[in-house]
Each structure stands twice: as structure tokens, then as C-alpha cells.
Image (spheres, helix red, strand yellow):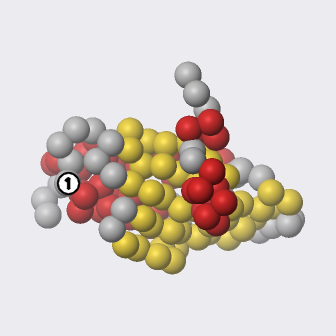
Amino acid sequence: MLRAADEAPNSLIDGGYGEPAGFVAVPAGLKAAQIQAAILQAATGRGWTVQEKSDGKIVVHHERGRWVSTVTLLYDASQVQVFSKSFRSGKPRLPDWVRFLKEDIAKDLVNAPFVKE
């Protein structure tokens, strides 16, 4: 199995999105609006602030104590790619928050077909 860093094109890393932090598989048959809603629900439910929202891309931000984290989520019908610019006391690190965010996105995507629009 390839690591997320091995799968991410250099243009995404160099494009300012940050370090690859994995991906979440999207269940078949979901519409873009359902995917976006699941991501937003997971992020806001965990206290992330939405900085940017467009088709196929959401950027969220969170600060707590010495941690500062900005996560870019690129999505399509097959997956949500996660990129992180996270720092603790000015040093790059990946907080557990990003893992928790991915777990919540996965749960919300599974439940998306059952949520009324």
C-alpha cells in the first residue's frame, strides 16, 4: 500500500496545500453536495472554522493552545484528499485533530444518503 505522500502529486504539495495527511474514501453514488455537506458537518462539529468553500475544495482552520492548523480538503466522487499545514510552537507537526476530522468525515459520508437535503 502506498502512503498518502507517495500518492499526492507534487503540484498539490507545492501548490501551498501543505503536507499530505491521508484520504477518506467516498462511498459510491454520493453527489458533490452530499460530500461537501459531510465534510462541513464534520469540521464544524469539531470546532474547525471554514476559511474557504468551493466546488471540490474546502479549507478549514483550528487553533488551540500552541497548535495552529489549516487543513485543505480536496474532494471528488471517489475520495477526500487531506492536506495539513499544522504547527505546534512554530514547528511543523500533525495533530491528532486531523485524524479525528478524517474519522468524522468518513462517518458522515456513510450517513450522507440518509440525511434529508
Residue found at the far top of this picture: 1
- Depicted 103 relative to depicted 97: above or below: above
Residue under the image location 48 percent in, 58 percent down: 73
Residue under the image location 42 percent in, 65 percent down: 57
Residue under the image location 53 percent in, 68 percent down: 60
Residue 42 image point, x, y percent: 42, 57
Residue 93 image point, x, y percent: 77, 53
The amino acid on which the numbered mark 1 sits, given as a three-letter code, is Lys
Q: Quadrant of the N terminus?
A: top right
In the image shown, does 90 or 81 lie closer to the viewer?
81
Quarter where residue 37 is shown: bottom left
Quarter where residue 92 is shown: bottom right
Residue 112 image point, x, y percent: 23, 50
Residue found at the far left of this picture: 116
Residue that label 1 marks: 31
Residue under the image location 51 percent in, 77 percent down: 51
Drawn side of residue 114 relative to residue 96, left or right: left
Drawn side of residue 78 relative to residue 68, left or right: left
Quarter where residue 99 is shown: top right
Total labels: the figure holds 1
Disc 1 residue crowd, few under 14, some 14–19, many 20+, Cα 10 Å: few
Q: Quadrant of the C terminus?
A: bottom left
Is residue 100 shown to the viewer in this render?
Answer: no
Is residue 94 shown to the viewer in this render?
Answer: yes
Residue 26 image point, x, y percent: 32, 42
Q: Secondary structure at mark 1?
A: loop
- Depicted 54 relative to depicted 117: above or below: below
In the image shown, does 84 or 39 lie closer to the viewer?
84
